[in-house]
Amino acid sequence: MSHTPHELHEEFPAEADKIHELKVSNAHFARLAEEYHSVNREVHRAETGVEPVDGLVETEMRKKRAHLKDEIARMLAGA
């Protein structure tokens, strides 16, 4: 399997311990992280042509990923 960019540990390398702790202790954060992971994989498959999608659909997927990342960043900042 090829490398999937934008994984949470790459986006927030200094926050690896917080990410792990929140995944274990906070159900909402765990759900957000799982949703981010899923959307990120979908975007990667679209970008690499494994599962091509319409350009508008790909843009919407990227927006969703960015929104999830922003919410995760807010939670990490508050932890």
Image (cartoon, rainbow, N blue to C red):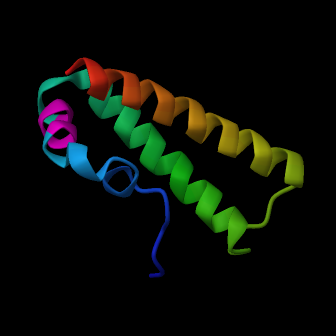
For the stretch drawn in magenta, the main secondary structure is helix
Residue plotted at (23% across, 43% down): 15
Residue 27, how many percent across, how many down?
24, 23
**Measured from the top left, where is residue 57 in percent x and y?**
81, 46
Residue 65 quadrant: top right
Query: Residue, x 68% and y 74% (percent of image)?
Result: 48
Q: Residue furthest top?
A: 78
Report if residue 20 lies within the magenta region. Answer: yes
Residue located at (81% from left, 59% from top): 53
From the viewer's side, name the closer residue of 64 and 14.
14
**Is residue 51 left or right of 29 when viewed as pictured?**
right
Q: Is residue 27 above or below residue 44?
A: above
Q: Position of residue 47 (x, y in %)?
A: 70, 66
Quadrant where the N terminus lies?
A: bottom left
From this view, report whether residue 32 is shown above or below residue 13.
above
Asked if residue 77 lies left or right of residue 70, the reply is left
Q: Which residues are magenta?
A: 18-23
Q: Quadrant of the C terminus?
A: top left
Q: Is residue 39 above or below residue 32?
A: below
